[in-house]
Image: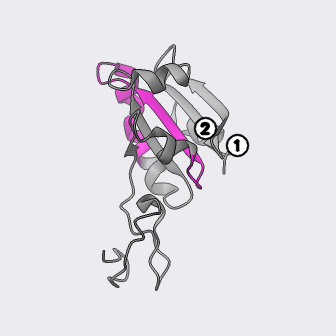
Amino acid sequence: MYCPSCHTPNRLDPSKDPQEARCGKCGAPLTPAGPVVVTDGTFDQMVLRSTLPVLLDLWAPWCGPCRTIAPILEDLSRKYHGRLRVAKLNVDENPYTARQMEAMSIPLLLFLKGGTVVGKLVGAYPAHEIERALQSVL
């Protein structure tokens, strides 16, 4: 994989999370910025075992407020790339994890550090409120 910043070729260790890979020369993240999609099958590895703090968005495609905050989460993912993982879990397609995370209302934003929920926002919030709550995990 080539570094998007300095274009140096890098090898990825298959035993490690590719979202956390950094260039061996310049240290830039090798993966593109943006939220990662998690499922019941990948939730444990991508969220609970993440070495980065995680902002988890539990959402559904039919939910208007969920679609309203999606661009905010995209922006935060780019702004904090390499320091924070923004993950999206579709509650309709992943009922097991939605139930495990006690998603009674959506959108539900969970802030996790070390696999533990340290903060929560229920509903659509403006960008500055989400970013303020995000400070609890950074």
Mark 2, residue position:
111
Labelled disc at residue 42: none
Residue extending farthest to the top is 104
In terms of secondary structure, where does tag 1 sit? loop
Residue extending farthest to the front is 15
State how far apart marks 1 and 2 are (Cα).
Answer: 8 Å
Q: Residue at x 46, y 39 (%)?
A: 43
Residue 7's x, y, as percent?
32, 82
Q: Quadrant of residue 55?
A: top right
Instruction: Determine whether, in the image, residue 99 is placed left or right of residue 65.
Output: right
The magenta stretch is 49-74
Residue 134's x, y, as percent?
62, 42
Question: Neighbour class for label 2 at 10 Å: few (<14), some, many (≥20)?
Answer: many
Front-lying residue, 89 or 15: 15
Q: Residue at x 48, y 59 (%)?
A: 81
Q: Quadrant of the N terminus?
A: bottom left
Q: Amino acid at mark 1?
A: Ser
Q: Is residue 98 magenta?
A: no
Q: Amino acid at mark 2?
A: Phe
Q: Is residue 51 magenta?
A: yes
Question: Neighbour class for label 1 at 10 Å: few (<14), some, many (≥20)?
Answer: few
Front-lying residue, 95 or 130: 95
Mark 1, residue position:
136
Front-lying residue, 54 or 44: 44
Q: Residue at x 49, y 47 (%)?
A: 45
Residue 18's x, y, as percent?
41, 61
